[in-house]
Image (cartoon, rainbow, N blue to C red):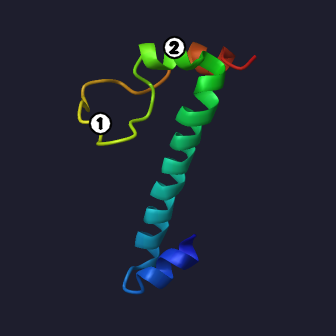
Amino acid sequence: MAKIIAEINPHWSDETIFQEVKHINAAQIQHITYNEFLPMVLGRRVMHEHELVLLKDDFFTDYDPNVNPSAAAGFTTAAYR
């Protein structure tokens, strides 16, 4: 992916290419998580009830910088046991 990005943007530095590829990879993981993994684990009904379904059109505009995005240590430790 970095090679393709570098070919499209030959004026970018290695660091810029790395950061952009990192963002693309994170977006792919998010897409897989919200469209494939969570619907199977939680079910589509729960996904809709908690507004976890990715938007097909437009963008999410309700970002709140005061919300703590971290997961509780107990959950991260025991979630998949």
Q: Quadrant of residue 57?
A: top left
Count of numbered circles in the view: 2
Of residues 45 and 70, the one drawn nearer to the viewer in this rendering: 45
Residue drawn 54% across the image and 54% down it: 25
* Residue type highlighted by circle 1: Phe
Residue 17 rendering spot, x and y as whole percentages: 46, 72
Q: Is 48 placed left or right of 66 in the picture?
A: right
Q: Quick check: marks 2 and 1 in contact, CB under 8 Å?
A: no
Which image quarter is the C terminus in?
top right
Rendered residue at 29%/41% (across/down): 59
Q: Amino acid at mark 2?
A: Val
Q: CA distance from mark 2 to mark 1?
A: 19 Å
Circle 1 crowding by C-alpha within 10 Å: few under 14, some 14–19, many from 20? few
Assign a secondary structure to mark 2: helix
Q: Is residue 38 above or below residue 18?
A: above
Secondary element type, mark 1: loop
Lateral position of residue 31 relative to residue 62, left or right: right
20 vs 32: above or below: below
Between 72 and 62, the residue placed more toward the observer is 62
- Which numbered disc, 2 or 1, marks the residue that appears first in the sequence? 2
At which x and y percent is residue 3? 57, 78
Which residue is at a point 29% across and 36% down the rendered structure image?
Answer: 60
Left of 58 or right of it: where is 27? right
In the image, farthest residue toward the front: 57
Image position of 27 with respect to 54: above or below: below
Numbered label attached to residue 46:
2
Residue drawn at x 59%, y 13% as measured from the top left = 74
Instruction: Judge the density around disc 2: few (<14), some (14-19), many (≥20) Cα neighbours within 10 Å.
Output: some
| Residue 51 to residue 15: above or below | above
Task: Determine whether, in the image, residue 10 is placed left or right of residue 2.
Answer: left
Q: Which mark is residue 60?
A: 1
Q: Toward the viewer: 73 or 16?
A: 16
